[in-house]
Image (tube, rainbow, N blue to C red):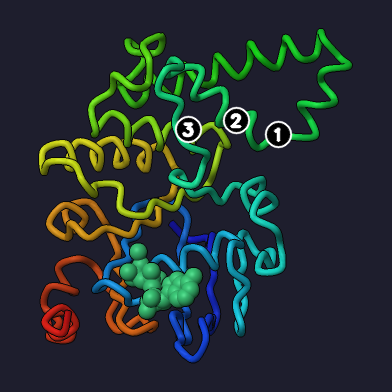
Amino acid sequence: MEETLLKIKEVRKHFGGVYAVNGVSLNIKGGGIWGLVGPNGSGKTTLFNTILGLHRPDEGAIYFNGKRINNLAPHQIYTLGLVNAFQIPRLFHKLSILDNMLLAARGHQGDRLLNSLFLRKNWQEQEVELADKAMKILESLELDHLALSPAGELSGGQRKLLEVGRGLMASPTLLLLDEPAAGVNPNLGKKIFEGINDLSRDGLSFFIIEHRLEILFDFAHWVYVMDKGKIVVEGKPEEVLEDPTFYQVYLGE
Ligand SMILES: Nc1ncnc2c1ncn2[C@@H]1O[C@H](COP(=O)(O)OP(=O)(O)O)[C@@H](O)[C@H]1O
Ligand SMILES: [Mg+2]
Protein backbone atom coordinates (compact mmCIF):
# COMPACT_ATOMS: atom_id res chain seq x y z
CA MET A 1 0.00 0.00 0.00
CA GLU A 2 2.86 2.47 -0.49
CA GLU A 3 3.16 3.31 -4.14
CA THR A 4 0.87 5.95 -5.61
CA LEU A 5 -1.08 4.45 -8.50
CA LEU A 6 -3.30 7.37 -9.43
CA LYS A 7 -2.45 10.98 -8.66
CA ILE A 8 -4.93 13.75 -9.39
CA LYS A 9 -3.69 17.32 -9.03
CA GLU A 10 -6.01 20.31 -8.97
CA VAL A 11 -8.28 19.03 -11.72
CA ARG A 12 -11.09 21.23 -12.99
CA LYS A 13 -13.71 20.46 -15.59
CA HIS A 14 -16.58 22.74 -16.48
CA PHE A 15 -19.64 22.48 -18.68
CA GLY A 16 -20.69 25.94 -19.78
CA GLY A 17 -20.51 28.12 -16.70
CA VAL A 18 -20.73 25.27 -14.20
CA TYR A 19 -17.67 23.59 -12.73
CA ALA A 20 -18.65 19.92 -12.38
CA VAL A 21 -15.17 19.19 -10.98
CA ASN A 22 -13.69 22.19 -9.23
CA GLY A 23 -10.14 21.63 -8.05
CA VAL A 24 -9.87 17.97 -7.05
CA SER A 25 -6.60 16.54 -5.77
CA LEU A 26 -6.31 13.00 -4.50
CA ASN A 27 -4.00 10.00 -4.37
CA ILE A 28 -4.91 6.36 -4.81
CA LYS A 29 -2.22 3.98 -3.64
CA GLY A 30 -1.77 0.38 -4.75
CA GLY A 31 -4.13 -2.16 -3.20
CA GLY A 32 -7.49 -1.90 -1.51
CA ILE A 33 -10.89 -0.38 -2.12
CA TRP A 34 -11.15 3.38 -2.40
CA GLY A 35 -14.62 4.92 -2.26
CA LEU A 36 -16.03 8.08 -3.80
CA VAL A 37 -19.38 9.27 -2.47
CA GLY A 38 -21.43 12.45 -2.56
CA PRO A 39 -24.90 13.69 -3.40
CA ASN A 40 -26.34 13.59 -6.91
CA GLY A 41 -24.68 16.09 -9.20
CA SER A 42 -21.60 16.53 -7.00
CA GLY A 43 -19.28 15.65 -9.90
CA LYS A 44 -18.35 12.02 -9.21
CA THR A 45 -19.06 10.63 -12.67
CA THR A 46 -17.47 13.65 -14.33
CA LEU A 47 -14.31 13.03 -12.26
CA PHE A 48 -14.26 9.38 -13.37
CA ASN A 49 -14.80 10.30 -17.00
CA THR A 50 -11.96 12.81 -16.76
CA ILE A 51 -9.65 10.17 -15.28
CA LEU A 52 -10.61 7.77 -18.09
CA GLY A 53 -9.85 10.26 -20.85
CA LEU A 54 -13.48 10.76 -21.89
CA HIS A 55 -13.23 14.40 -20.84
CA ARG A 56 -10.15 16.60 -21.06
CA PRO A 57 -9.63 18.49 -17.82
CA ASP A 58 -9.67 22.27 -18.23
CA GLU A 59 -6.95 22.54 -15.59
CA GLY A 60 -4.79 20.23 -13.55
CA ALA A 61 -2.94 16.99 -14.16
CA ILE A 62 -3.58 13.26 -13.79
CA TYR A 63 -0.82 10.68 -13.38
CA PHE A 64 -1.09 6.90 -13.47
CA ASN A 65 1.97 4.96 -12.30
CA GLY A 66 3.92 8.19 -12.55
CA LYS A 67 2.97 8.78 -16.19
CA ARG A 68 0.90 11.78 -17.15
CA ILE A 69 -2.31 10.46 -18.72
CA ASN A 70 -4.57 13.46 -19.09
CA ASN A 71 -3.56 13.97 -22.71
CA LEU A 72 -4.09 10.35 -23.67
CA ALA A 73 -7.03 8.79 -25.51
CA PRO A 74 -9.35 6.44 -23.57
CA HIS A 75 -8.01 3.28 -25.25
CA GLN A 76 -4.43 4.26 -24.35
CA ILE A 77 -5.43 4.71 -20.71
CA TYR A 78 -7.22 1.34 -20.84
CA THR A 79 -4.07 -0.29 -22.17
CA LEU A 80 -2.04 1.12 -19.27
CA GLY A 81 -4.27 -0.84 -16.89
CA LEU A 82 -6.75 1.81 -15.75
CA VAL A 83 -10.13 0.38 -16.65
CA ASN A 84 -13.78 1.20 -16.13
CA ALA A 85 -15.65 -2.09 -16.05
CA PHE A 86 -19.00 -0.55 -16.94
CA GLN A 87 -17.77 1.22 -20.03
CA ILE A 88 -17.06 -1.83 -22.09
CA PRO A 89 -19.61 -2.29 -24.89
CA ARG A 90 -22.89 -3.74 -23.72
CA LEU A 91 -23.55 -7.38 -22.97
CA PHE A 92 -24.81 -9.66 -25.72
CA HIS A 93 -27.68 -11.47 -24.04
CA LYS A 94 -27.91 -14.38 -26.46
CA LEU A 95 -24.20 -15.11 -26.42
CA SER A 96 -22.60 -17.20 -23.71
CA ILE A 97 -20.89 -15.65 -20.75
CA LEU A 98 -17.57 -16.92 -22.01
CA ASP A 99 -18.13 -15.32 -25.43
CA ASN A 100 -18.99 -12.06 -23.76
CA MET A 101 -15.71 -12.21 -21.85
CA LEU A 102 -13.77 -12.86 -25.06
CA LEU A 103 -15.55 -10.04 -26.91
CA ALA A 104 -14.67 -7.62 -24.12
CA ALA A 105 -11.00 -8.40 -24.64
CA ARG A 106 -11.22 -8.22 -28.43
CA GLY A 107 -13.19 -4.99 -28.50
CA HIS A 108 -10.08 -3.21 -27.31
CA GLN A 109 -7.62 -5.06 -29.51
CA GLY A 110 -8.51 -3.55 -32.92
CA ASP A 111 -5.13 -3.43 -34.65
CA ARG A 112 -3.76 -6.54 -33.10
CA LEU A 113 -6.82 -8.50 -34.12
CA LEU A 114 -6.52 -7.30 -37.71
CA ASN A 115 -2.87 -8.33 -37.76
CA SER A 116 -3.71 -11.71 -36.39
CA LEU A 117 -6.01 -12.48 -39.32
CA PHE A 118 -2.81 -12.79 -41.35
CA LEU A 119 -1.10 -14.92 -38.76
CA ARG A 120 -3.58 -17.69 -38.22
CA LYS A 121 -1.41 -19.80 -35.92
CA ASN A 122 -0.76 -16.82 -33.74
CA TRP A 123 -4.46 -16.09 -33.71
CA GLN A 124 -5.37 -19.54 -32.46
CA GLU A 125 -2.81 -19.41 -29.70
CA GLN A 126 -4.16 -16.08 -28.64
CA GLU A 127 -7.73 -17.45 -28.60
CA VAL A 128 -6.75 -20.34 -26.36
CA GLU A 129 -4.85 -18.01 -24.06
CA LEU A 130 -7.78 -15.61 -23.81
CA ALA A 131 -10.27 -18.40 -23.14
CA ASP A 132 -7.99 -19.70 -20.42
CA LYS A 133 -7.74 -16.29 -18.85
CA ALA A 134 -11.52 -15.79 -19.10
CA MET A 135 -12.21 -19.09 -17.33
CA LYS A 136 -9.81 -18.22 -14.50
CA ILE A 137 -11.55 -14.89 -13.99
CA LEU A 138 -15.01 -16.51 -14.08
CA GLU A 139 -13.79 -18.98 -11.49
CA SER A 140 -12.67 -16.18 -9.18
CA LEU A 141 -16.13 -14.61 -9.52
CA GLU A 142 -17.87 -17.97 -9.03
CA LEU A 143 -19.43 -17.75 -12.47
CA ASP A 144 -17.42 -20.54 -14.10
CA HIS A 145 -20.26 -23.07 -13.89
CA LEU A 146 -22.33 -20.68 -16.04
CA ALA A 147 -19.63 -20.04 -18.66
CA LEU A 148 -21.63 -21.60 -21.49
CA SER A 149 -25.03 -20.19 -20.48
CA PRO A 150 -26.45 -17.18 -22.31
CA ALA A 151 -25.62 -13.92 -20.54
CA GLY A 152 -29.33 -13.07 -20.61
CA GLU A 153 -29.99 -15.79 -18.03
CA LEU A 154 -27.89 -14.19 -15.32
CA SER A 155 -29.44 -12.51 -12.29
CA GLY A 156 -28.89 -8.80 -11.78
CA GLY A 157 -26.08 -9.40 -9.31
CA GLN A 158 -24.35 -11.98 -11.48
CA ARG A 159 -24.55 -9.63 -14.44
CA LYS A 160 -22.71 -6.96 -12.44
CA LEU A 161 -20.05 -9.52 -11.55
CA LEU A 162 -19.75 -10.43 -15.22
CA GLU A 163 -19.19 -6.76 -16.02
CA VAL A 164 -16.40 -6.69 -13.46
CA GLY A 165 -15.08 -9.87 -15.08
CA ARG A 166 -15.08 -8.26 -18.51
CA GLY A 167 -13.09 -5.37 -17.06
CA LEU A 168 -10.60 -7.87 -15.65
CA MET A 169 -9.90 -9.21 -19.16
CA ALA A 170 -7.72 -6.11 -19.61
CA SER A 171 -5.51 -7.20 -16.67
CA PRO A 172 -6.04 -3.82 -15.01
CA THR A 173 -4.12 -2.61 -11.99
CA LEU A 174 -6.87 -0.11 -11.11
CA LEU A 175 -10.54 -0.77 -11.80
CA LEU A 176 -13.04 2.10 -11.65
CA LEU A 177 -16.63 1.15 -10.89
CA ASP A 178 -19.50 3.63 -11.06
CA GLU A 179 -22.23 2.32 -8.74
CA PRO A 180 -21.73 -1.47 -8.88
CA ALA A 181 -24.55 -2.06 -6.38
CA ALA A 182 -27.12 0.17 -8.09
CA GLY A 183 -30.40 -1.53 -8.88
CA VAL A 184 -29.73 -4.83 -7.11
CA ASN A 185 -31.14 -5.94 -3.75
CA PRO A 186 -29.02 -5.39 -0.61
CA ASN A 187 -27.93 -9.04 -0.38
CA LEU A 188 -26.70 -9.09 -3.95
CA GLY A 189 -25.07 -5.71 -3.45
CA LYS A 190 -23.13 -7.18 -0.57
CA LYS A 191 -22.21 -10.23 -2.65
CA ILE A 192 -20.86 -8.01 -5.41
CA PHE A 193 -18.70 -6.18 -2.89
CA GLU A 194 -17.52 -9.48 -1.41
CA GLY A 195 -16.32 -10.48 -4.89
CA ILE A 196 -14.58 -7.13 -5.27
CA ASN A 197 -13.02 -7.54 -1.83
CA ASP A 198 -11.57 -10.95 -2.76
CA LEU A 199 -10.03 -9.48 -5.90
CA SER A 200 -8.55 -6.59 -3.92
CA ARG A 201 -6.90 -9.09 -1.58
CA ASP A 202 -5.15 -10.50 -4.65
CA GLY A 203 -3.59 -7.08 -5.24
CA LEU A 204 -6.03 -5.35 -7.57
CA SER A 205 -7.03 -1.79 -6.64
CA PHE A 206 -10.55 -0.40 -6.89
CA PHE A 207 -11.89 3.14 -7.00
CA ILE A 208 -15.64 2.90 -6.55
CA ILE A 209 -18.50 5.39 -6.73
CA GLU A 210 -21.39 4.02 -4.72
CA HIS A 211 -24.67 5.50 -3.59
CA ARG A 212 -25.35 2.56 -1.25
CA LEU A 213 -23.21 3.92 1.56
CA GLU A 214 -24.09 1.15 4.01
CA ILE A 215 -22.51 -1.41 1.68
CA LEU A 216 -19.53 0.65 0.53
CA PHE A 217 -18.55 1.67 4.05
CA ASP A 218 -18.31 -1.99 5.08
CA PHE A 219 -15.66 -2.66 2.45
CA ALA A 220 -13.81 0.55 1.57
CA HIS A 221 -10.64 1.28 3.51
CA TRP A 222 -10.65 4.96 2.46
CA VAL A 223 -13.53 7.21 1.42
CA TYR A 224 -13.54 10.52 -0.44
CA VAL A 225 -16.67 12.66 -0.05
CA MET A 226 -17.42 15.02 -2.91
CA ASP A 227 -19.74 18.03 -2.89
CA LYS A 228 -20.18 20.68 -5.57
CA GLY A 229 -17.11 19.55 -7.48
CA LYS A 230 -14.74 19.40 -4.51
CA ILE A 231 -13.49 16.76 -2.08
CA VAL A 232 -14.82 18.02 1.26
CA VAL A 233 -14.01 15.09 3.56
CA GLU A 234 -11.73 12.08 3.33
CA GLY A 235 -10.72 9.33 5.68
CA LYS A 236 -11.43 5.84 6.89
CA PRO A 237 -15.15 5.04 6.82
CA GLU A 238 -15.45 5.37 10.60
CA GLU A 239 -13.72 8.77 10.48
CA VAL A 240 -16.00 10.02 7.70
CA LEU A 241 -19.02 8.91 9.72
CA GLU A 242 -17.86 11.09 12.59
CA ASP A 243 -17.43 14.21 10.47
CA PRO A 244 -20.31 16.71 10.64
CA THR A 245 -19.53 17.95 7.11
CA PHE A 246 -20.43 14.51 5.77
CA TYR A 247 -23.99 14.87 7.14
CA GLN A 248 -24.34 18.50 6.03
CA VAL A 249 -23.48 17.50 2.48
CA TYR A 250 -26.22 14.88 2.41
CA LEU A 251 -28.79 17.05 4.17
CA GLY A 252 -28.45 19.54 1.32
CA GLU A 253 -29.36 16.88 -1.23
N1 LIG B 1 -21.89 16.14 -20.42
C1 LIG B 1 -22.37 17.10 -19.61
N2 LIG B 1 -22.78 18.29 -20.09
C2 LIG B 1 -23.23 19.25 -19.27
N3 LIG B 1 -23.31 19.14 -17.94
C3 LIG B 1 -22.91 17.99 -17.39
C4 LIG B 1 -22.42 16.90 -18.19
N4 LIG B 1 -22.10 15.87 -17.36
C5 LIG B 1 -22.37 16.30 -16.11
N5 LIG B 1 -22.86 17.56 -16.13
C6 LIG B 1 -23.23 18.34 -14.92
O1 LIG B 1 -22.13 18.30 -14.03
C7 LIG B 1 -22.56 18.17 -12.69
C8 LIG B 1 -21.97 16.92 -12.07
O2 LIG B 1 -22.59 15.76 -12.66
P1 LIG B 1 -22.08 14.29 -12.41
O3 LIG B 1 -20.61 14.26 -12.57
O4 LIG B 1 -22.88 13.39 -13.24
O5 LIG B 1 -22.44 14.10 -10.85
P2 LIG B 1 -22.63 12.77 -10.00
O6 LIG B 1 -22.05 11.62 -10.75
O7 LIG B 1 -21.93 13.06 -8.71
O8 LIG B 1 -24.11 12.61 -9.79
C9 LIG B 1 -24.08 18.18 -12.75
O9 LIG B 1 -24.52 19.50 -12.51
C10 LIG B 1 -24.40 17.76 -14.16
O10 LIG B 1 -25.61 18.26 -14.59
MG1 LIG C 1 -22.89 9.76 -11.34
Q: Which residue is mark 3?
A: 166
Residue located at (58% from left, 36% from top):
170
SS category of the residue bearing label 2: helix
Percent position (x, y) of residue 36?
Answer: 32, 65
At a point 35% along the width and 59% down the height, the residue shown is 34
| Residue 152, image quadrant | top left
Q: Would the CB of label 1 be found within 8 Å of ligand 1? A: no
Quadrant of image for the N terminus: bottom left
Dot placed on the residue nearer the N-terminal end, 3 or 1: 1
Can residue 26 be seen in the rendering of this structure?
no
- Mark 1 lies on a secondary structure that is loop
Position of 27 with respect to 209 (left or right) is right
Side of 146 where 133 appears, left or right: right
Real-space CA distance between mark 3 and mark 1, rounded to the nearest whole angstrom: 14 Å
**Marks 1/2: CA distance?**
7 Å
Question: How far separated are the C-alphas under marks 2 and 3?
Answer: 7 Å
User: Helix, strand, or loop for circle 3?
Assistant: helix
Q: Residue furthest bottom?
A: 17
Relative height, residue 165 to residue 183 (above, below): above
Answer with the quadrant where ligand 1 appears in the image.
bottom left
**Dot label at residue 109:** 1
Sequence-wise first label, 2 or 3: 2
Residue type, numbered disc 2: Ala
| Among the 4 quarters of the image, the one containing residue 114 | top right
Q: Residue at x 32, y 31 (%)?
A: 159
Mark 3: which amino acid?
Arg
Measuring from the top left, give residue 64's x and y in whole percent: 61, 61
Circle 2 sits on which residue? 105
Q: Amino acid at mark 1?
A: Gln
- Name which residue lies at 76% across and 14% down: 123
Viewer-nearest residue: 155 or 78 = 155
